[in-house]
């Protein structure tokens, strides 16, 4: 499995608190929501955002992820690991080009599971949205029909009233 920089995806640093991570998740989910991006397929991006949340919100998964993150994004040529919350310029360049694999097998399984869950969540969201849209269309048509009927009856009453007024003159 390819290592994904969830911190970059959520636009936070590895030092972010759980609260900051939650806020970043909401910000990215709103930013990449299909309603905010008409004509653009944001499904994969939304799946990755959900995947990042699932891994980073779990303390054990985040601990393993942070260890892998420090390994993948440490400064090239050093034997020690620099602090994960202090990216170097080389880290920034490496982040955009890295195709490194996840070495920790447990983390790889968790990430794969998070990916499947995020795909399932996206499918369920689309299904729910479709269902809500159908209900909204039905309710809208029902309400529209009621208004049309009311306008038609009102029009007939007004016509009848004016016809009576003419007849009385």
Image (cartoon, rainbow, N blue to C red):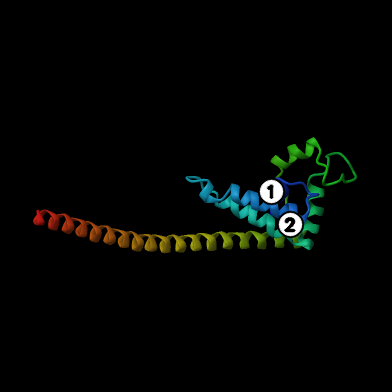
- Tally of numbered discs: 2
Residue 46 horizontal side relative to residue 158, left or right: right
In the figure, residue 136 lies in which quadrant? bottom left
Give the image location of residue 110, x and y in percent: 71, 62
Q: Nearer the viewer, residue 145 or 15?
A: 145
Q: Which label is found at residue 76?
A: none
Q: Residue at x 74, y 52 (%)?
A: 20
* Secondary structure at numbered mark 2: helix
Give the image location of residue 2, x and y in percent: 69, 51
Of the numbered discs 1 and 2, the one sitting upstream in the chain is: 1
Q: Residues within 10 Å of mark 2 (few under 14, many from 20)?
A: many
Write down the residue under mark 1. 10
Contact check, label 1 and label 2, Cβ < 8 Å: yes
Q: Which label is found at residue 56?
A: 2
Residue 66 horizontal side relative to residue 39, left or right: right
Residue 130 horizontal side relative to residue 118, left or right: left
User: Outermost residue toward the right?
Assistant: 80
Give the image location of residue 75, x and y in percent: 83, 40
């Amino acid at each position: 499995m390819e290592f994904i920089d969830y911190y970059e995806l959520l636009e936070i640093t590895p030092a972010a608190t759980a609260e900051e991570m939650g806020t970043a998740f909401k910000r990215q989910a709103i930013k990449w929501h299909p309603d905010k991006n008409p004509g653009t397929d944001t499904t994969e991006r939304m799946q990755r955002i959900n995947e990042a949340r699932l891994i980073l919100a779990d303390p054990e998964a985040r601990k393993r992820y942070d260890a892998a993150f420090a390994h993948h994004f440490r400064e090239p040529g050093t034997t020690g690991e620099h602090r994960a919350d202090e990216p170097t310029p080389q880290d920034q360049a490496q982040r955009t080009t890295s195709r490194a694999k996840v070495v920790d097998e447990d983390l790889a399984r968790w990430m794969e599971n998070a990916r499947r869950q995020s795909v399932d969540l996206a499918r369920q969201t689309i299904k729910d949205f479709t269902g809500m849209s159908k209900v909204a269309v039905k309710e809208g048509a029902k309400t529209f029909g009621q208004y049309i009927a009311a306008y038609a009856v009102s029009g007939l009453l007004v016509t009848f009233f004016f016809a009576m007024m003419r007849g009385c003159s």
